[in-house]
Image (cartoon, coloured by chain):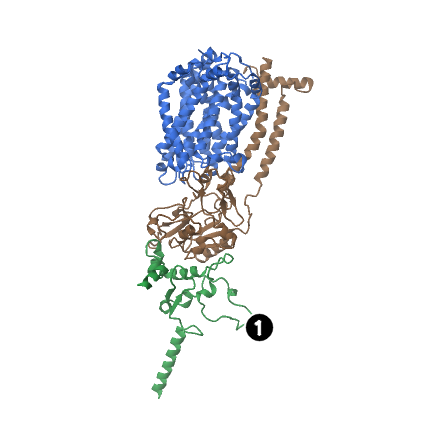
Chain colours: A blue, B green, C brown
Amino acid sequence: MKEDIFVKEESFPARFTDKLLMGMPLSEYARALITPFNVVAMILLCIGFPLIGIRFAKGLAAVTHASNEYPWSILLGWGLFAGVPLSATGYVMATAVYILGYKRYHSLVRLGVLTGFMGYLFAVIYLLIDIGRPWRIYYPMAVSYGPTSVLFLVAWHVATYLTVQLLEFSPAILEWINARRSRKWAILITIGMTVGGVILSTLHQSALGALFLLAPGKLHPLWYSAFIPVFAFISSIYGGLCMVIAVSTVAAKWLRERADRNFLDNLDPLTVGLGKAACIVLFVFFALRLIGVAHDDNWALLGTPYGFWWLTEVLLFILVPGVILTVGVKRSSARIVRWGAFTALAGIILNRLNVSILMFNWNLPNHFRDIVPPAREVFIVLSIITFHILLFRWILNRMPVLREHPDYPEEHG
Amino acid sequence: MKKATVIVVALALWIGVSAGAGSAAGGGVPKVLTLGSLSKVYEPVPFNHSGHVSMAGGCSDCHHQHGSTQVQACSECHRIDPSAFKKNVNVSRLKPCGDCHPASARAEDVGRPGLMAAYHQACFKCHRGEVGSVGKDPKGCTEMCHVPKEQAKLEEKK
Amino acid sequence: MADNPRKGALGDGIREGERTVKENGEGERGTLSRRQVLQTLAAAGGAALIGASAEVFAENRISGWPDRKGMLTDLTECVGCRTCEKACNQANRLPEPEVPFDEKSVFEKKRRPTASAYTVVNRYANPKSSDKPFYRKVQCNHCNEPGCAAACPVRAYTKTPEGAVLYNKDVCFGCRYCMVACPFYVPAYDYESALDPRIVKCTLCHERVKNGGMPACAEACPAGTITFGKREDLIKLARNRIRKNPDRYIDHIYGEYEVGGTSWMYISGIPFDRMDFPANLVEKPLVEQTKGFLSAVPLVLTIWPALLGMCYAATRNKEGKE
């Protein structure tokens, strides 16, 4: 069945259904769609999408508890602040393979770039839902510049980087639709796009941390540091590596038939290799967090309730994953490395949620009551996550990401 | 004869002292003043001046032309003219509030409150405890001094 | 690789390049000699650093708009009559509040400016005398170098020559970063509106002031709590009052230096932190907090291509020799 996808049909309509329905007749395709996962996904979409409609019809107050003290809630806390470091997969893998020359990870590059591209695309979708006037989202790029603002930099970079990642992924799309000449051009620009991507990523990954430099009194001192931009950038590196491990694990388990032997056979050793890199960066990050506390001499705060929360985040979700990864690497066990990767990812999500929501305005009265999102907002986020997964799966099913297109044998960039 | 002289002298002294004590140079002490120059939301306020005079320690508690921390400079009111050094005072009576405090405050002269502020600050010096708890008491402004114009009209109709 | 001490950290690549330079005086095509790399980096880094260090010496006590106006609020005079709230509401044609302005029970809870109230007054206990509480008027402080203006990615905030910080709803796209930045928690957002959501805050009655008038709250205050005038004059007035009545006032003008100085300043009879004024604010304007990070942008744009290009060339070179 795998080979059927790449059979060239004569007529356009036949080719069209061939590409979209993966070579199955419509009735068979429709029947194949009914799986437990799809049913649950459909339910979530049916709850969430009308809620998004309500947001646009009635304003943000209808679906969030965003207030004058807490302007940002989980729509951005999850979609932008947690989502972007998890989308660092693109620049991390492209750097490893094309700039640092680790050729053997080639089978994972496209997966990384796709994960990253989708992550940024959905960050934009979360933004479109969250900002007050979504139809003006292009204003910082075209209408009125505010270059003193870190958010101005983030806006420009997300727009530019989205384009860069699309171009980096375009070879896969062009192979899928058999556009030979365009594909050749797309391959040529890979190295330039990679370098551009690293530059952009360095700046905007750190910018997501630097945003909070402007509010020194509002972020708890254990999370606020002059080094926040560095923390954000370094954590995005291991975030990207661990996300590649996580996504490749899920793909190898649930989309096995879409992957080729090269991908599947090499995945475990590659996972251990990625785990090694992630582990090093994780320990660097752990040390940086300690430096952050030392720099402001906040050791005494570790004895407070918030201090215990900090210790939970740093010890349980940064140090422990580092130890797990070390054990996994030492024993060359992909399984243990995967455990380490998932816990490290949980740590990144926790850290970004802490910085953007939980530890923000920690000193206001009723803090913990005011940051709880309403169920509506939670369902909106769940439905967008579902849509994200479904779109991701749709692409992985059809395009040569987990496998190579037989017409385009692997080329060394 | 001596008794009569004593009585007359005593009387004269008494009249003189009471007159002098009760009056500013050049006129009598106003008994009740009606403060209406700013009247907009409220009716003009009747002010029991002579009652306050007997209660106050001295004129300068409210008429703070001299000897208080609130006046800014002598030259605000006086010209120093070398030719008539001793007689260079160009005003010689206690001024009413409106003589120095303009009807509305001017941004160019931040040290001089407007007339409304001056009235209230003078009253609040002593009455702040009752009126000053305006923030606590719903009656507040209208309890002691002010009658809203609509209310006056309503009462007139009755 | 570790057993041969002559090999550099990047493997044979650099060493090969060096030898090539020595032999024929220039690097082979496709390889970079160590000398070339270091020269490029030094030039790029040096150029970028010179630009950065000039900023360190830049003046950061800006004195633009010398005639800008301000407001001095003498919190020892305020009696909590809420006439300022009413005047503001009427002057700006804001919606009628649910609770009328002479209702004093509102003081039982602390309020903040909202999408329909530019200013509110809160009550605080006076430790010295329970029937003379203190009141605090809360509104935009119209900072000298506003954090909201530094935060806005579309430049929706402007510091005017008259002193007011104005918000332009025609460019705002609702990111709400200004609300994160404001150290006084001032900007309110109209979340209820689907098509016209916007930031709502005090405007220092800019139109009135431009035409020679006075902000509505200052004009309406019966107790003379709020004085409007040139900021410099107000500071002198405040210092004078504090000096002449040391028992009445705390010796501090709130807003004189906080976050670079604000147009709206306060003097008080009890410590400011007891009236929910944000304490421990830095004296440098908020815009300075992110300048360091933003200055790194040209450095990264300059150095990273050279650094990455060097890595790329080094690894290609290494492959070429294998």
Q: Is C36 on the left or on the right of A291, as rendered?
A: right
Regarding residue B66, the answer to whether it shows in the image is no
Q: Position of residue A392 (x, y in %)?
A: 44, 21
Regarding residue A397, the answer to whether it shows in the image is yes
In-front residue for pair C65/C129: C65
Chain where mark 1 sits: B
Relative to B10, does residue B43 appear above or below in the rendering? above
Q: Position of residue C56 (x, y in %)?
A: 57, 39
Q: Which residue is mark 1?
A: B83
Q: Amino acid at mark 1?
A: Ser
In-front residue for pair A29/A122: A29
Q: Position of residue C185 (x, y in %)?
A: 43, 42
- Quarter of the image holding residue B82? bottom right
- Quarter of the image holding residue B39? bottom left
- Residue furthest to the bottom in view is B1
Q: Report the quarter where the C terminus of chain C lies.
A: top right
Q: Position of residue C237 (x, y in %)?
A: 48, 56
Q: Report the quarter where the N terminus of chain C lies.
A: top right
Say few, some or many: other residues with alpha carbon within 10 Å of mark 1 (under 14 / 14 to 19 / 20 or more).
few
Relative to B89, does residue C26 appear above or below in the rendering? above
User: Tag 1's secondary structure?
Assistant: helix
